[in-house]
Image (spheres, helix red, strand yellow):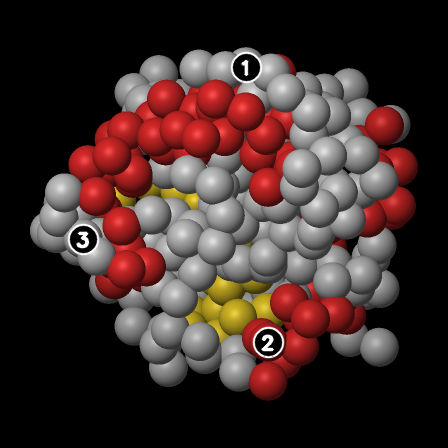
Amino acid sequence: MLDPFKIDGNTCISLSGGRTSAYLLHRALQSNGGLPDGTLVLFCNTGKEEEATLRFVRDIAEHWQVPVTWLEYRLGGSFQVVDFDTASRSGEPYEQVIQQRNGVLPNLRARYCSSEMKTRTMHRYLRSLGWTDWETMIGIRADEPRRAAKFRFNPHPETKAEYVRVPLVDAFVSARDVGEFWQAQPFDLALPNIKGKTMHGNCDLCFLKPAAQVLSLIQEKPERAVWWAEQEQKAEGVAHGDGARFRNDRASYAQMAAFADQQTDMFDQDEEAIACFCGD
Ligand code: SF4
């Protein structure tokens, strides 16, 4: 069988800041004897990541001696290259993408946050380097069949210029394999790994996380709700219907903040997170 991690031609490795995509990078480095020419490792910061995620991305570059390019979305559909020290920590790229959409919030029907701040931001950067076609490796595991099927069915979800590869699926890598790998490393993401899932990963209170999880993250650190509640408050004045709230099928962030010191069992404890590109 061909090595699914072998790289041939312009390739972008998408690092989400989670353990899975970092493991993907490790396997790619192993299979190719380092980072081949014409391969870039990109991390897109939304400004709503946990500090531990930013430290993990920095540590990966240092421990594995691999350059990681940090990108952020900028108003007008552009991007900015940043680094660990200059990366936004207060949701600035996210607020700019909302502003670009005239204050309409991303929501279940229009999840533009991920595509604009991550996928398209990477594409804009790669095109700025003169890339016209390339492959992108993303960290989807074999135990995420629905996410994998989406890219199998359509490996060009955004543009024909890009072919999306899911090598961890081809290599039958599961959450357990990823967990075991990180347990044996001298550094790790300093966020809890619960049954292979990192509840704190990606944007801290991402609206695709189950409500009970969002509530528990607010209980753990109430100030997490402030930014999200502020965005909803601003959107109420300019948007209607879906775009006025991140989720109009459940409590607002302000309401969740108010519930936070009550019981969590008002929400479905078995609700699954909704998959998106952001991933682990
Ligand atoms: S983690 Fe959630 S809120 Fe953040 S960009 Fe991805 S889908 Fe949007």
Three-letter code, disc 3: Ala
Pinpoint residue 35: horizontal percent, then vertical percent: 56, 48
Q: Mark 3 highlights which residue?
A: 239
Q: Residue at x 50, y 64 (%)?
A: 136
First along the sequence among labels 3 and 1: 1
Q: Mark 3 falls on what kind of element?
A: loop
Give SS at disc 2. Answer: helix
Residue nearest the viewer, comparing 243 with 273: 243
Residue indicated by mark 1: 221
Some atom of ligand 1 lies within 8 Å of the CB belonging to the residue at label 1 = no
User: In the rendered image, which quarter contains the N terminus?
Assistant: bottom right
Is label 3's Cβ within 8 Å of ligand 1? Answer: no
Image-quadrant location for residue 82: top left
In three-dimensional space, the C-alpha distance between marks 2 and 3, rounded to whole angstroms, equals 31 Å
Q: Nearer the viewer, mark 1 or mark 2?
A: 1
Count residues near mark 3 (Cα–Cα under 10 Å), then give few for <14, some for 14-19, many for 20+: some
Q: x%, y% of residue 191?
A: 67, 24
Element type at mark 1:
loop
- Three-letter amino acid code of the residue under disc 1: Lys
Mark 3 → mark 1, Cα distance in angstroms:
29 Å
Q: Is residue 27 above or below residue 134?
A: above
Residue 67 image offset from top left, x and y in percent: 47, 36
Q: Nearer the viewer, residue 63 or 256?
A: 256
The residue located at (64%, 51%) in the rendering is 273
Q: Is residue 257 above or below residue 68?
A: above
Q: Who's the residue at 74% across and 70% down the image? A: 145
Q: Is 7 or 43 nearer to us in this picture?
A: 43
Residue underneath mark 2: 150
